[in-house]
């Protein structure tokens, strides 16, 4: 019975309340913070769980009164109001019962790289970056380019940006993978549609506690910037390349004129990449976790096609097709893409959890 699954959450919430009023916990700041965070995460679930139990009990009581000559009509009326509430509450509670992704609240490092398609892929990197920028503006996120490499005919061979805001990773995590574009390039004289691809990486930002990179495990190389950052950039070895020796993971930044600033940015990117590699390893080892994702989250997975001639966006993982590509690309209307992805992920997670 679904009602019985809710009691452990209510009991734990009450247990936390008791613990937080204990003098022992009050003197242990880290433990108190940990319990307060857990309590906060349970508040909405417990509130709805109690309402569900009250509603279920009221339904049972009213059903028993249906045959009563005096109260039967009143019971019937109350049942017509109460019974539709139960499935809605159950649906909301199931979502709240799902295990939280510890990275959902984090800011991210966004990495876009041109793949197959040469100049056209680089131009598409710029288009996708603009798409994400427009969406970030709509939802109030802050976006900052950390590093970029220009394409030979415009666009970017690579662009790395930091995005800060509310639920950034939770919203964008399903966008990791290969994004394919089908359109007629400006250089195409015969009007033929070309297919190009770019890679999108969505990496949660991490702090020193989560990833402890030891100084003796990091090799640092400096070199002169090859970008168009001005004469002063190119006359000093301000560009920085950091290599994490145990994994071979590399981060290189050259956009700032200061070597110190480039090193700080490169370290942030390196930590995020090392953390992501460990996450991917855990994901690969856990078949059940993989089912909770929309796809595997792998950079090598083709997830989406942007077809310009047909004004069509297709997400291959959930069979989503939208004929609103111009609105998505130019105005950043990604809400119509993200909401079905999140709904699908929740449905799969509920099945996996057996709720």
Image (cartoon, grey):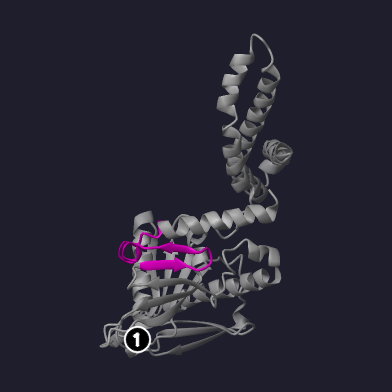
Q: Position of residue 173 (x, y in %)?
A: 52, 64
Q: Which residues are magenta?
A: 312-335
Q: Secondary structure at mark 1?
A: helix
Q: Quadrant of residue 326?
A: bottom left
The 10 Å Cα crowd at callout 1, few under 14, some 14 to 19, many 20 or more, is many
197 over 95 or under it: above or below: below
Q: Position of residue 133 (x, y in %)?
A: 35, 65
Task: Tell me the quadrant of the picture where the N terminus can be found.
Answer: top right
21 over 74 or under it: above or below: below
Q: Position of residue 349 (x, y in %)?
A: 63, 56
82 over 71 or under it: above or below: below
Residue drawn at (44%, 67%) of the image = 314
Q: Quadrant of residue 287?
A: bottom right
Farthest residue to the top: give it: 70
Q: Nearer the viewer, residue 91 or 275?
A: 91
Q: Is residue 114 left or right of residue 105?
A: left
Q: Nearer the viewer, residue 50 or 104?
A: 50
Q: Position of residue 186 (x, y in %)?
A: 26, 83
Q: Is residue 264 left or right of residue 69?
A: left
Residue drawn at (50%, 68%) of the image = 316
Whether residue 82 appears in this view of the structure is: yes
Q: Nearer the viewer, residue 107 or 185?
A: 185
Q: Is residue 76 magenta?
A: no
Residue drawn at (59%, 48%) of the image = 95
277 over 340 or under it: above or below: below
Residue drawn at (57%, 25%) of the image = 80
Q: Nearer the viewer, residue 344 or 272?
A: 344
Q: Is residue 320 magenta?
A: yes
Q: Quadrant of residue 256?
A: bottom left
**How many numbered callouts?**
1
| Residue picked out by circle 1 | 119
């Amino acid at each position: 019975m679904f009602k019985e699954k809710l009691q452990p959450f209510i009991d734990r919430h009450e247990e936390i309340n008791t613990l937080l009023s204990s003098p022992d916990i009050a003197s242990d700041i880290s433990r108190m913070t940990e319990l307060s965070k857990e309590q906060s995460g349970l508040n909405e679930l417990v509130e709805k769980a109690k309402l569900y139990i009250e509603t279920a009990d009221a339904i049972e009581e009213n059903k028993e009164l249906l045959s009563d000559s005096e109260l039967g009509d009143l019971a019937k009326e109350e049942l017509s109001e109460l019974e539709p509430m139960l499935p809605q509450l159950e649906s909301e509670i199931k979502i709240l019962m799902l295990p939280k992704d510890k990275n959902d609240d984090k800011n991210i490092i966004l990495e876009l790289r041109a793949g197959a398609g040469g100049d056209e892929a680089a131009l598409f990197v710029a288009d996708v970056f603009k798409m994400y920028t427009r969406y970030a503006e709509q939802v109030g996120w802050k976006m900052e380019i950390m590093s970029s490499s220009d394409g030979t005919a415009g666009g970017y061979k690579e662009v790395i940006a930091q995005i800060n805001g509310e639920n950034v990773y939770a919203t964008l995590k399903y966008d990791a993978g290969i994004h394919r574009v089908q359109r007629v390039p400006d250089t195409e004289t015969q009007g033929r549609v070309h297919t190009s691809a770019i890679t999108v990486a969505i990496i949660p930002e991490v702090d020193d506690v989560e990833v402890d990179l030891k100084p003796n495990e990091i090799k640092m190389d400096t070199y002169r910037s090859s970008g168009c950052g001005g004469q002063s950039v190119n006359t000093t070895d301000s560009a920085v390349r950091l290599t994490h020796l145990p994994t071979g993971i590399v981060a290189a930044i050259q956009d700032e004129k200061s070597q110190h600033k480039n090193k700080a940015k490169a370290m942030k990117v390196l930590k995020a990449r090392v953390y992501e590699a460990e996450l991917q390893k855990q994901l690969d080892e856990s078949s059940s976790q993989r089912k909770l994702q929309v796809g595997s989250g792998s950079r090598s997975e083709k997830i989406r096609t942007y077809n310009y001639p047909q004004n069509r966006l297709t997400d291959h993982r959930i069979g989503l097709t939208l004929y609103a590509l111009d609105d998505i690309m130019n105005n950043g209307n990604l809400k119509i893409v993200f909401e079905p992805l999140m709904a699908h992920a929740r449905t799969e997670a509920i099945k996996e959890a057996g709720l």
